[in-house]
Amino acid sequence: MATTEEYVTNKQIKTRLKRSAGQLDSVLRMMDENRPCEDVLVQLSAVKSSIDKAMKLVIARNINNCVDAMTTADVQNLEHSLDLLLKTK
C-alpha cells in the first residue's frame, strides 16, 4: 500500500491521468483498425481502472489536506477503505 505522501502528489495524479489518456488513445486506434470487440473491451477496462486509481489519489489527497490530526494508522485505514470502495464499482 502506498504511503500518504505518495497519494498526495500532483505529479502522481498527472502521471496516472496521462497513462489513462494514452490507453484511451489506444482504444480509438483499435476502433479505427476494426479490432475485435474483446480487444477493445480489455483496453477500455484498463482505462476505467486507471481512472478509478486517479480518483482514489485525488480523494486521498483531499482527505489528507483536510484532516491534519490523523495518526498513521488512521491514514492507512482510510487508504484501505478507499481501495475497497473503488473495488466495488
Image (cartoon, rainbow, N blue to C red):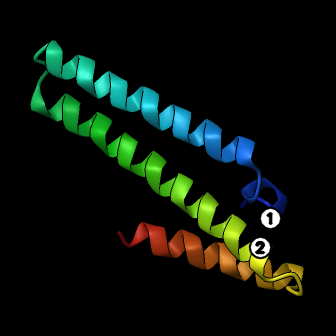
Give coordinates of residue 22: x percent, y percent.
44, 26
Give coordinates of residue 38: x percent, y percent.
16, 34
On screen, residue 37 above or below 49: above
Using the numbered discs, state the Cα–Cα distance from disc 2 to disc 1 in whole angstroms. 7 Å
Residue depicted at x 52% and y 59%: 55
The numbered disc on residue 54 is: none
Taking depth in this image into account, of 5 and 65 the one nearest to the observer is 65
Question: In the image, is 30 to the left or to the right of 77?
Answer: left
State which quadrant residue 64 falls in.
bottom right
Residue type at tag 2: Asn
On screen, residue 72 above or below 34: below
On screen, residue 62 above or below 81: above
Give coordinates of residue 59: x percent, y percent.
60, 68
Dot 1, how many residues are within 10 Å of its Cα: few (below 14), some (14-19), or many (20+)? some
Question: In the image, is 58 to the left or to the right of 51?
Answer: right
Q: Please tell me whether mark 1 sits on a helix, a strand or a loop.
A: helix
The numbered disc on residue 64 is: 2
Taking depth in this image into account, of 87 and 28 the one nearest to the observer is 28
Q: For the N terminus, give its image quadrant.
A: bottom right
Mark found first going from the N terminus, 2 or 1: 1
Question: In the image, is 60 to the left or to the right of 76?
Answer: left
Residue type at tag 1: Thr
List the residue tagged with mark 1: 4
Residue depicted at x 38% and y 73%: 88
Q: Please tell me whether mark 2 sits on a helix, a strand or a loop.
A: helix
Contact, mark 2 vs mark 1 (Cβ under 8 Å) = yes
